[in-house]
Structures are given as structure tokens and as C-alpha cells.
Amino acid sequence: MGGMREHQALPPFHKLEVEPRAMLNRVHAVFYTCAILLLFYHRSLNLFHSISFCSFSFFLSLLLSDIILAFMWSTTQAFRWRPVRRWEYLENLARAIDDRDFPALDTFICTADPYKEPPMGVINTALSVMAFDYPTDKMSVYVSDDGGSELTLYALMEAAKFAKHWVPFCRENKIEVRCPEVYFQTADGACSDAIKAWAGERKGRIYQFPKKYELVMYESMKDRVERVLERGHISEDQITSDEERNAFKKWSTGFAPQDHPTIIQVLLESSKDRDVTGYELPNLVYLSREKSKSSPHHFKAGALNALVRVSAEMSNAPVILTLDCDMYSNDPQAPRRAMCYIMDRNKAPKLAFVQFPQYFHCIDKNDIYGCEYKRALQINQLGMDGLLGPEYAGTGSFFQRKAFHGPPSLPELEVLDSHHRSAVSLRSRAVLSAAQHVASCTYENGTNWGSKVGFRYGSLVEDYYTDYRLHSEGWESVFCKPTRPAFLGDMPIHLNDVLSQNKRWCIGLLDVVFSKYNPLTFGITRISFLMGMCYAHYAYWATWAVPITIYGFLPQLALLNGITLFPKVSDPWFYLYIYLFVGGYGQDLIDFLIAGGTIKRWWNDQRMWMIRGVSSYPFALIQFTFKLIGISDFGFNVTSKVIDDEQRKRYKQGIFEFGVASPLFVPLATVAIINLISFIVGASRVLQQGKLEDFFVQLFISGFVMANCWPIYEAMVLRRDRGRIPMKTMVISIFLAWVLYLVASITLKI
């Protein structure tokens, strides 16, 4: 920070304001808490006045559900206690600090499977980052290929060649969207501006391309990469130099994705490689860490720690940006926004990272799968920012390297003796040898890596677990939410992928619950009560399965058998239930709308919450239980980013994608069937016997669930496309619904 002007007070680089609704949230919390206590009192009265074991069991189940719902609601109040907003002053930063005084930046991009995460997406992300509005000689991009694929390396070699043209093109034309694929798709008309620029038709152009190229340079690169991916190997005619030939020789006989030596390939070196205008290019490095069948892999956290060590040996930038392979830069100013906090003398000493919100560029207008995760990725982050800072979302985060080496109040742990950094070239034998050594699968043995240093092991959700541990050590974080999304990524558009991804997250979160770092014991004592409750909210995500499943089946089965579980409409207690429902859903809707959402998106978001509640969450609980008792373990499955045209078309039309006989779909179809039958039977009973006020609440619950289940009914009966629910799933679900009805009927007669 020596370049800051020492002789005068620095202007503010950022501003913070507490949201005005914070006080209203607290007042609402007081009234709602009183209502919850009254609910428990009423449930207790029902238990004491139960006339049979069956009714006692029903009311006990509802009480258990209400206790879990109350607990999860109480954890959300921590997010609502002090939500804040921040603004960055880029103009003040520019006046106070020269470009040459900005800290160096290392960017980590992780990929694991070229067939689930297409290499074109990886290189588009890399190219968008290399074109940041940031000093190019201070940037390094590291791509970790945990699948150890020569196809990914080939794609990055092609990207390195294209970067020599793309980076200056973005710089000179002041382009905002610097992801080539997106830019060429969204430019005016058939990319007319891009064509003119690439063809060199504008005056004053430093370089020119033949007019026949237009967009051919990018399209030809894309074609080569996709043909290699389709072929599955690199042929001799694809190799253009001896350096490339030697690189691909590393994929020798016996090479396997889970058993291979370290591969490090320097594709661009800032001190030597120049773009077509003569400017320096960022460093670009390919890494595939050593893998051994006998050594733990630690999945993504292990790959990130290898990147931390390798980058320390090669460039050792004090700032690290982590990105998913499909999360491209949408704002070239993003690094400067992060520097507004990192270069703040008052903030920097305890600042671990600056988190940008996750946004997605391919979500349909109504977000039918709730993949925007607006509450988790935006609303809750603002609330945590008002405490000690947001959680690490796994991507779009600018870390200070020192945060990975111990608490801010103590000396750094496990600091590498990287005496090779002064070497002239990243390609030198000394640098590469040192980098390969720290990327070996045995390097971490007997060290603090993964426990006290680097990204933390012990959970499949390394992002949540790492920032939780960092906050517990005394570090803070910042949520940077500019008007223009800094990064945009892909999300799954197949329901099975969405639910499987959620199941994996829940299993990873349960790892934390059943460890010594449980947020309710460790978190609230080590960090603070409110921050501990924030982390507990996510850690106990899977417990949503209990109340959602019970409310999805129990009132409906009771309705089928003519049993009332809720107060009559004329009973004063009825209004308590109305207040709890409207108050809970109403506040959630208001938060959603204030955050820029729409009513339709909110409806889809709460529908997906219920869908996950009877599929992802219970399956996660079951699978984690099996893991605890040693029956099975759960590995890290990469979510596929490959989408066929039919799926994309149905998604854009707002149609749910089933298509496969997934076990996750069975409870969805079962709950849809039970609620449909119970509503029909209950409504007919009301019409015949005139007992609407007795069964109104249960009819309402069935009707509400039915409204949310419309996509399921549609996929079961009305659709004939390949995305409908398979007949096998429907048959199993009908059988289960029948069994549940029989069990409930027999139990009520005992």
C-alpha cells in the first residue's frame, strides 16, 4: 500500500448504511414469538385432551413439526436483525491509488469433468477474467483440472492463443461483457459491431484482421475444442508445436483421473508473452494436482488448497479470486470494487474476503426451480454483512491470502519457504519443481492444511465450512453488491440435478452439525450468538424435511378419515393459525420483493422449498444416517452443465423436467396424489355434511399443496414429451399413497 498518498487524508472508498426495515423486523419478531408460544400452548392442550393413542400421536407429530419450524424461523431472525447496504467509490480509489500500486491478483478456476463442465465454458470464464480492467502484469489465472483431462489442457492452449487478440480487443473497445461467447451472442444484430472491430474497419485500429475472419477466429477455436471433446483425445494434427507435444506426453499409459502425477503447464507468462498490440498478458497456468487411490482427495477443497500453494510458489499474489468454471466476469471493474475494501487501512487487517452475490444468466423469467436462491445468496448475505460479514458462496470471492494462514491476531501458520519466486521465469525448472512438490498428494501429511490452514476439510460444502471457521478465528468479510452483477454463471435446468445438488449440500452441512464445530455449541460461543444462529440455519437445513413431510401427509390422511386436527373457523384459536401463516409467508414475500424479486418468482421459490422438503432433505437425512453407521459414504458429484435443446426449450417455457426414474421424484408424486385425493374426499364430505368450519384448515392445506403440485400433475397426466414423469415412478407413487392410506386407516381404528 506504499502507493497511497501519505501526505493527505484518503477519501472514503466505501459507505455502509443499515436498512430502515431492521427495526420493523425486530418488532415483528417480538409479536411473532408471542404467537409461536401461544401455538405451543394450544398444541399442549390438544395433547392433554387426546382421547386415543392415535390422536395423541397426530398432535405430537404436529407439535414436533411446529418446534422445528419455530427453531428454523428463529434462526432467520439473525439475518433480519441488522441488514445493511454498501456502496463503493471507484472514483475516490482511482484518485488515491495509482494502477501500479494495486496488489497482484491470483484467480483460481476449478473444473473436474470435461463432459459435465464443457471446456468452452471454462475457457470463456478464464478469458473474461484475463480481460479485467486491472493491470495485466499483476494478474495470474490458475485453472485447476481435478479430472486430469488432456481435453481441458488443449482447450486452455487454444484460449491462450485467442487471448492475445481478445484482451486488447476488450481494452480498446471498453467492452463490459468480456466473456466471448456471451458478447458475440448479445452484440447488436449478428454481432455487427464485433465483426467490424475484428475486421479492422474502424480507423485508428492498431491491429487488423482480414475481413474474411470476422468472428471466424473465435468460432474456429470453438469448433476445434468441441471436435476434440467429441473425439475424446488429442490427435497429432491438433498439435502445433513441440511444447504442446511434450505437454500431452504426460498422459501416458496408466494415467487415470484418480491416479496420476502432478501436471503443471505454464501457457502464458506475463514477463514474456505479449498480446498483438505489444502489451503484457496475464499469467495463465494449468494445474492438475497429483492423485493417488491411496490418498484422500478432499474434492474441491483439496484442489483449492493445491492452488493456494502452487500459486504461492509461482506468483504469490496477496489477493486471490475464486471462481466456478462457469461463472464468467460480467463487470471488468469487479477487482477495483473489491480493492475499495481490501485497500482500506481500517478494514484490511481483519478482512478475510469480499463476497460478490451469485447471479445466473440463463434463468427463465420466472425461475421455476428457485435456482436464484435469492434468500440464501442475496437477502441473508445482507443480514450477515451487518454482523461479521457474509458467508463464502464458493465463487465470486476476493480473499486476502493471509486469511488462509491463521487468525488475524497470530503469526501466519504453514508459510511456504518460496525462495524460488525471485526466479526470472515461471517456466524455470526451480519454480516448476517447487510447485509440483507442493501439489503432491502427500504434501499435506503432518501439516495444518485443511484443519487450521487453507480451505477446510471435513464437509462436502467447503465454502460454508471454510468461512465459518474463518469467522470463528476472528476474520470478517464484506458483501459487495453493485447494481451490475459482477459475475454470471450457469445453473442446472433439470429437476433431478437441482434436487441432487441440494441433497449433496445438506449432507455436507450435516457433517458440520455432527462435529465439534456445531454452530449451536461452538459457533454461538466462539463467534457471536447472532452469527452462530446464521450458521445454524444452514447447518440444520435438512431438518426442514420433518415439518414439511408431516404437513404434506398427516393433515391430509386425517382429512381422508374424517379427523379434525385444527381449530374450527368459529374458534378464536383459528385466528392464531391465520396470523402465523400470513405473518410468516408475508414477511418472506416482502423481503423477496424488496430484493428485486417478483411475486411469480417468490411463488416458485417457496414451491421449491416444499419440493426439496419431501425429496432432497429427507434423502439427505437418510443417506447421512447410513454414512454415520458406516453403511455407505457420499462422494462429490459434479453437477452437469450440459443441456440439450429440448430441455432448454421446455425450461424456457416454464415446464418442469422430470424424464428419469429418479427416487427423488417418488415422494413428490406421492404427496401430490395424497393431497389431490384428500381434497376431493374432504370437499365432498363438506358438501354432504356441511362441516366446512371443522375441516377448513385441512382443506386449505390440501388445496395449497395441490396448487404447488400443479407441475407434477401436469407431468403425470397431461404431458407426452420426454420430460414427463416416467410410468415406473407413477406406479410406485400410487402404490405408496395407497399403503399410507391403509396404514392411517388401520391405525385410527386401533
Image (tube, grey):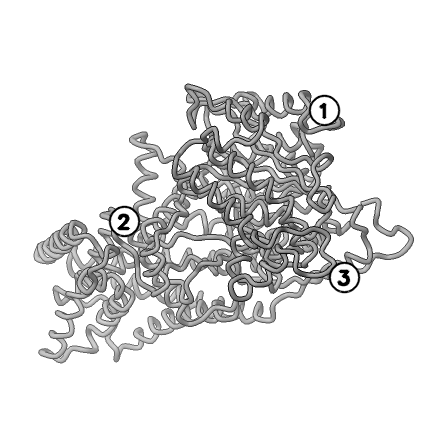
Marks 2 and 3 sit apart, C-alpha to C-alpha, by 51 Å
In the image, residue 705 above or below residue 337: below
Q: Earlier in the sequence, mark 1 or mark 2?
A: 1
Which part of the image, by quadrant, shows the N terminus?
Answer: top right
Mark 1 residue type: His
Q: Is residue 325 visible?
A: no
Mark 2 residue type: Leu
Query: Label 1, on which residue?
Result: 420
Q: Earlier in the sequence, mark 1 or mark 3?
A: 3
Query: Which dot marks residue 390?
Result: none
Which residue is at the front of the view, 203 or 507?
Answer: 203
Mark 3 residue type: Glu
The residue drawn where x is 84% and y is 50% is 4
Helix, strand or loop at label 2? It is loop
Q: Are marks 2 and 3 in contact (CB under 8 Å)?
A: no
> Is the residue marked by circle 3 packed among few (<14), some (14-19), or many (20+) residues within 10 Å?
few
Q: Earlier in the sequence, mark 2 or mark 3?
A: 3
Query: Label 2, on which residue?
Result: 664
Question: Residue 576: x, y in percent?
Answer: 35, 72
Helix, strand or loop at label 1? It is helix
In the image, residue 303 above or below residue 732: above
744 displayed left or right of 88 = left
Question: Residue 694: x, y in percent?
Answer: 19, 74
The residue drawn where x is 42% and y is 67% is 365
Question: Residue 49: x, y in percent?
Answer: 22, 63
